[in-house]
Amino acid sequence: MQVDAKRAERATARAARAGAIARAGSVDAALAAGALPPRADLTLAEALVLGLLRQDVRTFLCVLGHGSTEVGEVLRVYHGAGALRACGLRSEIEASHAAVALRWLTGEKAAVVTSIGPGALQALAASLVAASDGVGVWYLLGDETTEDEGPNMQQLPGHEQGAFLRLCSPAGRAYSLHTPLALGTALRRGRHTVDHPYAAGPYFLLLPLNTQPALLPDYSFDELDCAPPPAVGAAADGGAYERVVDELLAAARVVVKVGGGAVQAGPELCEFLERVDGVAVLSPRAMGVIPYRHPRNMLVGGSKGTLCGNYAMEEADLLVAIGSRSVCQSDCSRTGYPRVRRVIGINADLDAASHYARTVPLLGDAKATLASLNAALARRQDQRQTGGPASPAAAESPSSWLQACAQRKAEWERFKAARYAQPTLVDPVWGRQVLTQPAAIKAITDWARQQEVPCFFDAGDVQANGFQIVEDDRLGQSFSETGASYMGFAASALLATGLASRPMYAVAISGDGSFTMCPQVIIDGVEHGASGCLVVLDNRRMGAISGLQRAQYGTDFATRDGVAVDYAAWARAVAGVQGLHGGWSVAELQEALGRARAHRGLTLIHVPVYFGDDPLGGMGVFGRWNVGSWCAETQAMRHRIGL
């Protein structure tokens, strides 16, 4: 009876704390107002939740199990009081994707909460997206008990200690709360990871079953306080800027590769391009950093790039890589710049800044470093204009380099127009004329831009065709998960529309293979108030891989099936979801999109699309890739270039 009384007393105190925080608006406000005492008896799980609230983590995406019961109870109380939002979901993969999308789309942070074992492994797999795209997400994973009373159900088999900690550590920073009073350190390291200004990513906090309910008597709220990590400034000079200016002004054909680390540097980038007479080639992560029709924007480049982007990479004699990880697809497996003799690397990460040979690295914030470099260029160019020969950038208007790139961009526009002019082709699977992916994606993305709603792209053909087609004039119009190319991301991302503090509408474009990998959003989206349109482009196969197999070996294998699925009927089976057929023409698809926008909640539009060898059915491939039968040739070329 005495134990029950103490438990009831603690439950009452917990509810009071949750209510005080909800009324005050934050933990800090409640402390400042005296609504919370500076010290309290807390379980480790409650102290953890309070620490996350102090870091403005207010959304918890949960797939609870026996490995997370105490955390789940704390979340129940705080959710009920209105101090946070906890959502029960059907898949840890879905939860992870939704957390990434929420942070990417709105900047709002979330924590993924799982049980021990398979659930934690599902979340770990999906965390590849957060790691690859540089998005900060908390992962609260159940773990085996610390007293080793015998194997815990669902832990990794064997008698090794800390198996999950070792498993998670290569995927991101990981910490085990084996010792409850180490919570302050765990929270600080987590914040440094998920809020890192240049290399954010997943943080795995392992919660042993028996330490979650451990009592921290008279625990100080001061231990839960940790400041965000600071940003660095511009790269230090030490003569490097003058050397870089010399290289830039001596070059005839400057290409600037813009990665995800440069997405906030749009104005500085535009000025830089003019000063060095350069052209920009974007990674998919950077779409919209400068407007699509900017004369110096050569769009995306790489193994699935554009005619103009890949031309600029092939012909440039100097590369400026800004905020780029130089992913293999993005730089044609290190063969994308065969004529480049000098590289300028601008990055806050030393390895990325010095990735290529013959590089002058500028280690610092991309936006600040570009501003400093622009100032150095301006000083030099002013001197030349007043007392010496004009700079190359001012010698011609437009220069031969810009003219040549502009001609390739005009050629790319004609290439795209030919595909839009033939929006349907006869498909042997469907036995009739169906929309091509270029025509369908063009119609969807144009509509989304007119509606001013963001578009999420799933993996495969949808993704690759998508970043070749979109015409973004600002950041935040398109989100293409090219970091891990994780099938199922786009559909799950729609859940973020209902999780955001300001609910919104979004479009997700997914292939049939990607959607069936992770379809839970059509249920969880209804439960948690998602609002958007999921367009399933159905060619009854994994088209990107079928196409790769045909290109390399002349035939495809084990990447298609003969099973017909009525995706619209599947969607309609879920109360609250509108299921539509997208039709067989652009006009019918546009009509379905209009009906989707008028629907309150989620709509799934099923669109049969063409797959085959007709070149008008896709956007083509213009780069190299170190994959399959191409490896020997690509690798040999890379080592000939020696970059």
Image (spheres, helix red, strand yellow):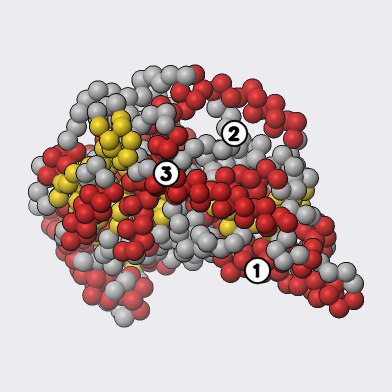
Question: Label 2, on which residue?
Answer: 624
Could you classify mark 3 by the number of other residues whose Cα lies within 10 Å: few (under 14), some (14-19), or many (20 or more)?
some
Q: Residue at x 28, y 63 (%)?
A: 504
Q: Residue at x 33, y 76 (%)?
A: 29
> On the rendered structure, is 240 left or right of 295?
right
Closest to the camera, between mark 3 and mark 2, is: 3
On the image, the x and y values in percent for residue 479 come to 41, 53
Closest to the camera, between mark 1 and mark 3, is: 3
> On the rendered structure, is 173 left or right of 611?
right
Could you classify mark 2 by the number of other residues whose Cα lies within 10 Å: few (under 14), some (14-19), or many (20 or more)?
many
Asked if disc 3 and disc 2 are in contact, CB closer than 8 Å, the reply is no
Q: Residue at x 82, y 57 (%)?
A: 250
Q: Residue at x 24, y 28 (%)?
A: 431
Q: Looking at the rendered structure, which numbered label has been put on residue 271?
A: 1
Q: Please, what secondary structure does the residue beneath circle 2 have? A: loop
On the image, the x and y values in percent for residue 63 come to 25, 44
Amino acid under disc 1: Glu
Q: Tell me how far mark 2 sits from mark 1, CA to CA.
A: 31 Å
Could you classify mark 1 by the number of other residues whose Cα lies within 10 Å: few (under 14), some (14-19), or many (20 or more)?
some
On the image, the x and y values in percent for residue 10 come to 20, 60
Q: Please, what secondary structure does the residue beneath circle 3 have? A: helix
Q: Is residue 156 above or below residue 222?
A: above
Amino acid under disc 2: Arg
Q: Nearer the viewer, residue 213 or 491?
A: 491
Residue 85 at least partly seen: yes
Amino acid under disc 3: Arg
Residue 456 at least partly seen: no
Identify the mark nearer the N-term, 2 or 1: 1
Q: Tell me how far mark 3 sits from mark 2, CA to CA.
A: 23 Å
Question: Label 3, on which residue?
Answer: 419
